[in-house]
Image (tube, rainbow, N blue to C red):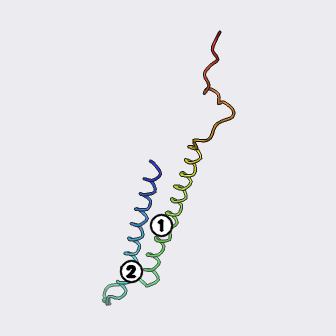
């Protein structure tokens, strides 16, 4: 996969994850404002917030690690494709055999 495509896929996925996390946090907040029935048990506010925040933090860590790998790949690719680099010593198997006289 080429680098621009990998970066585009990463940013699309990152934006989708941010939108999803905002929706999760908003629904957690909105659910607290609704009047609850005494017949239906509900989770504590701390529990609900924990189950909303922990996945967001873990996803942020995962996205950061992924971005580091994408950047490392780009750096490695740039190092390999420098057109101005010439080897001062011929590599074995890369030079034609000496012609016989």
Residue placed most toward the observer, 40 or 36: 36
**Secondary element at tag 1:** helix
Left or right of 38: which side holds 77?
right
On-image quarter of the C terminus? top right
Q: Crowdedness of circle 2 by 10 Å Cα count: few (<14), some, many (20+)?
A: some
- Where, by quadrant of the figure, is residue 43 drawn? bottom left
Picture coordinates of residue 93, whole percent (x, y): 61, 26
- Where, by quadrant of the figure, is residue 37 drawn? bottom left
Measuring 37% from the left and 86% from the top, which residue is drawn there?
A: 32
Q: Crowdedness of circle 1 by 10 Å Cα count: few (<14), some, many (20+)?
A: some
In the image, which disc is placed on residue 30? Answer: none
Asked if 97 appears above or below 53 in the picture, the reply is above
Measuring 51% from the left and 59% from the top, which residue is drawn there?
A: 66
Measuring 31% from the left and 87% from the top, which residue is drawn there?
A: 39
Residue placed most toward the observer, 11 or 20: 11
Left or right of 99: which side holds 5?
left
Q: Say which residue label 1 marks.
A: 59
Residue placed most toward the observer, 58 or 95: 95
Left or right of 80: which side holds 26?
left
**Secondary element at tag 2:** helix
Q: Say which residue label 2 marks.
A: 28
Picture coordinates of residue 26, whole percent (x, y): 38, 80
């Amino acid at each position: 996969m080429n680098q621009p495509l990998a970066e585009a896929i990463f940013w699309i996925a990152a934006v989708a994850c941010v939108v999803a996390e905002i929706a999760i946090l908003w629904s957690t907040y909105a659910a607290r404002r609704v009047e609850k029935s005494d017949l239906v048990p509900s989770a504590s506010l701390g529990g609900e917030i924990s189950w909303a925040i922990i996945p967001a933090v873990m996803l942020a860590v995962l996205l950061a690690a992924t971005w580091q790998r994408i950047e490392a790949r780009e750096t490695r690719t740039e190092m390999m494709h420098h057109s101005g680099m010439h080897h001062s010593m011929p590599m074995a198997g890369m030079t034609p055999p000496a012609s016989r006289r």
